[in-house]
Image (cartoon, helix red, strand yellow):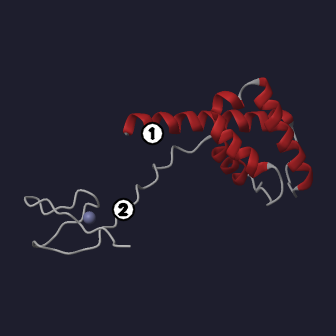
Amino acid sequence: MTEPMCCYDPVTLTCPTCGHVALRLPTYRTCRPVPVPPPPPGPPGAGHFLKKLLGYVGIRPSADCGCTATASRMDRLGPDWCETPEGMAEILGVMKASHATLRVLLPWTESGARVAVHSACALARRAALAASTSG
Ligand SMILES: [Zn+2]
């Protein structure tokens, strides 16, 4: 199998396929198109901020509690979902279950957890807004 060679534009000395710029012509070089980089990660979502907020009060998810999975679900579905009754019920359910298994100094309060989720949603909305206006 013969490898493709770069085919330089005689004016710009640039290979249109891989973007390599030759110093002089002719240049014989195996053309290796650069893979398209993945799209830049979006702004952090509500799950990210919720984990951060809980981290401030010393609550860190363990590897097998449902927190990390739920946090990425929150990131995917967005703050609007988190604040629906179903979303809030699901998140609070996971938080309560995890609270029981983690060594947390703070007592469980549903209203406290609810405030944390709403704060995380507000932070996620602000991050999304900042990302959309800056870019
Ligand atoms: Zn090339």
Secondary structure, mark 2, is: loop
Judged from this view, the residue extending furthest toward the top is: 85
Between residues 74 and 21, which one lies in front from this camera angle? 21
* Residue neighbourhood size for the residue with mark 2, other residues' Cα within 10 Å, grouped as few (<14), some (14–19), many (≥20): few
Decide if residue 122 is in sight here: yes
Judged from this view, the residue extending furthest toward the right is: 100
Between residues 117 and 14, which one lies in front from this camera angle? 14
* Residue neighbourhood size for the residue with mark 1, other residues' Cα within 10 Å, grouped as few (<14), some (14–19), many (≥20): few
Q: Percent position (x, y) of residue 68? A: 74, 51
Q: Amino acid at mark 1?
A: Ala
Mark 1 and mark 2: span between their CA atoms?
27 Å
Residue 118, quarter of picture: top right
Select label 1 or label 2 by which is in front: 2
Which residue sits at x=61%, y=33%? 122
Horizontal side of 14 relative to 118 (left or right) equals left
Which residue sits at x=13%, y=72%? 23
Q: Percent position (x, y) of residue 41? A: 50, 49
Q: Percent position (x, y) of residue 25? A: 10, 71
* Residue on which disc 2 sits: 34
Q: Amino acid at mark 2?
A: Val
Q: Is residue 59 above or below residue 113?
A: below
Which residue sits at x=73%, y=24%? 84
Q: Percent position (x, y) of residue 75? A: 64, 41
